[in-house]
Image (cartoon, helix red, strand yellow):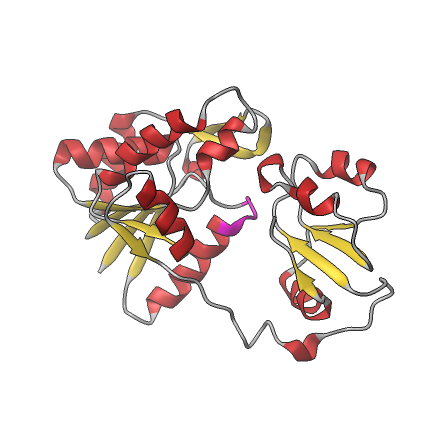
Amino acid sequence: MRILMVTDAWRPQVNGVVHTLERLTETLKSFEVQVDFLTPNIFRTLPLPTYPDIRLALTTPSHVARLIEAGKADHIHIVTEGPLGIMARRYCRKAGRPFTTSYHTRFPEYLSARLPVPERWAYNWLRDFHNSGQGTLVATQSLADDLASRGFDKLRPWTRGVDTDHFRPDKRKDTSFPRPIFLCVGRVAIEKNLTAFLDLDLPGSKVVVGEGPELAKLSARYPNTHFLGHRPNDELAEIYASADVFVFP
């Protein structure tokens, strides 16, 4: 079987969507499934306003349609609701091709944090986008319940796991940070609600791992927080093992 993944999020971005797709591709090999990708990397791009690390593909619906048809995939999965996802959905509906989608990011909250756009407008558009497919993959039951309450249907669980060969308690290291250590790992951006964590009056140390457009601003605003930036995977396993509390605000 060949599956085409259409995604606006891809390398060199470092985020949960890209990481998920990379791990998924490795796992599907054991099921004799070949995964092909349609990503911004093969097009001219422009930076996403307010978030230049994310590049948006500059192409046309007809070009995307030709690429999809040339790939001869057995199934099409639309990962993101960006330009490529929108054009792939348009092709599938016009050609009568079944497709699935996945819901990775709370895009309405992301958008309203940056622009004066009511969340309900974005949810109305997203509901139509995802409900037009055969199914929408979601990572957690709480997210599925929230989307169902907003009229999303055909929701399908796509749960995550932990690589216990890599992330293990025995990788715990001594650290100079006073304990307890409260650790938050992820993109340092406004929609991650990091100030809800950083404003807390907590004992010990607050540690933030990750990069993003808010890094310089938050580093200056919270000088007592340890901002470690991007860390390689091996070091990240040690950081997780050495923390006392995981925080995801």
Find out whether residue 1 is within the magenta segment: no
Quadrant position of the N terminus in the picture? bottom left
Image coordinates for residue 167, horizontal then vertical, percent:
60, 71
User: In which quadrant of the rendered view does residue 80 lie?
Assistant: top left
Say if residue 112 shows up in the picture: yes
User: In which quadrant of the rendered view does residue 67 lie?
Assistant: top left
Residue 217 vertical placement versus 184 (above, below): above
Question: Over which residues does the magenta segment extend?
Answer: 12-16
Image coordinates for residue 125, horizontal then vertical, percent:
32, 29
Q: How many marks?
A: 0
Residue at 12% across, 38% down: 96
Q: Is residue 188 left or right of residue 85?
A: right
Residue at 72% across, 74% down: 172
Residue 241 vertical placement versus 11 (above, below): below
Image coordinates for residue 94, horizontal then vertical, percent:
15, 31
Q: Is residue 51 left or right of residue 34?
A: right
Seen from the viewer's position, the closer of residues 26 and 103 is 103
In terms of secondary structure, what is the magenta stretch mainly?
loop
Residue 243 vertical placement versus 146 (above, below): below
Say if residue 6 shows up in the picture: no
- Considering every residue shown, the one lying at the far left of the view is 96
- Considering every residue shown, the one lying at the far top of the view is 116
Residue at 23% across, 48% down: 154
Seen from the viewer's position, the closer of residues 164 and 157 is 157
Q: Is residue 235 left or right of residue 111?
A: right
Image coordinates for residue 72, horizontal then vertical, percent:
20, 48
